[in-house]
Image: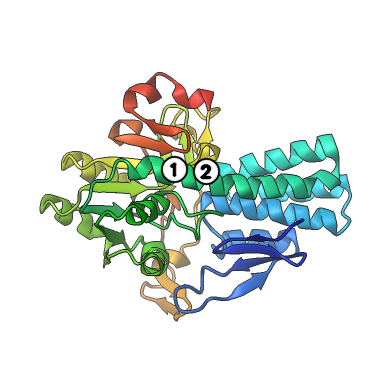
Amino acid sequence: MKDLLATSIKYQHGALYVLDQHQLPHQEQWLPCDSSDAMIAMIKKLQIRGAPLIGIGASLLLAYLSEQGLTADELHTQAERLRAARPTAVNLMNCIDRMLATLENEGPAGLSRCAEQLFEEDVDLCNRMAGFGAELIFDGANILTHCNTGSLATAGVGTAIGVIGEVKQQGKQLHVWVDETRPLLQGGRLTAWEMARLGVPHTLICDNMAATLMAQGKVDVVLVGSDRIAANGDFANKVGTYSLAVIAHHHKVPFYVVAPYTTVDPECPDGKAIPIEQRSPAEVQGVSGSFGEVNWAPDNTPVYNPAFDVTPAALVTGWILDTGVYSQEQIAAGVLKTL
């Protein structure tokens, strides 16, 4: 397989490496990944994260394993294990299904070609979303984001942050409000890091400050990503997204979800059918990262910790996909079922 280089994953000189996002923003450490056990552990620890990127990462790992001589049966077993690593993110399942179809039709030798195609396709999808989304953003806009949706979450420039980067490239003035994104602080740790790298003016806020900013007229548009979009337009994203959508709807602030077609699940009728991953209580009882670990709650405190929530389609202004920007009327007419 040829060398493939991205911000947070790379296949180089016959080996696969992942940028440990758990250590950002203070440390940039590349971890080798040479087994399904290693990739699954990285996905669960969020060392590799973002719905598009974990699909690409799992695909590259399968291609690597095929080059190490695993048989078709062995590769099939490893693919199924990888497929189950993050239940909400449908990109992972879509990528693995394409790899399995290639394995069935071409044997192990075809997996490297398929993984390369998935990687390069994701780069192209990001560029197209960025172009469509940037057309909606006026000069001088204040944009609010949630979680991390940039090159740390994809093989390309990102989804929502890809739009932001394109807006800057076009020479428009902008400012980004960065939600810290509790409980794992992907906004504070990762999006702020990416904004600085892009040279985009930004301000970090606590998640519970968004309503006040909107009431003061300081937010012009909300851009978020997605881990799965149902056929009716409901979508799952990092927990806290639904709250933002409700607040934006109340204050009449446009609310857009940015995602590639690989995030759409036409077989999923609505948000109620999207599985939501439940994560460790420790993530809410305290916080950990490159700075160490801090616990602020009693050890035995009961915790409810869903990784994602579901935003109803009725709260979405538009869906920015790689094929265009879709309105509520188009979504209601079933356009997502034809992608």
Q: Position of residue 320 (x, y in %)?
A: 39, 38
The residue located at (80%, 57%) in the rendering is 65
> Which structural element holds mark 2?
helix
- Choose between 95 and 141: the one closer to the eye: 141
Question: Mark 2 touching mark 1, by CB under 8 A?
Answer: yes
- Horizontal side of 116 relative to 195 (left or right) equals right
Which amino acid type is marked by label 1? Met
Q: Is residue 92 visible?
A: yes
In the image as oriented, which residue stretches furthest toward the left?
A: 216
Identify which residue, 32 or 246, lies in the foreground: 32
**Quadrant housing residue 251:** top left
**Left-right relation of 70 to 86:** right
Left or right of 294? Residue 263 is right
Which residue in the structure is indicated by mark 2? 125
Image quadrant where residue 198 sits: bottom left
* Residue 80 can be seen in this image: no
Name the residue at the bottom extreme. Answer: 292
Q: Using the numbered discs, state the Cα–Cα distance from disc 2 to disc 1 in whole angstroms.
A: 6 Å
Residue at 41 percent across and 69 percent down: it is: 197
Residue plotted at (75% across, 62% down): 35
Tell me the SS state at disc 1.
helix
Circle 1 packing at 10 Å, graded few (<14), some (14-19), many (20+), is many
> What amino acid is labelled 2 in the image?
Leu
User: Where does label 1 land, which residue?
Assistant: 129
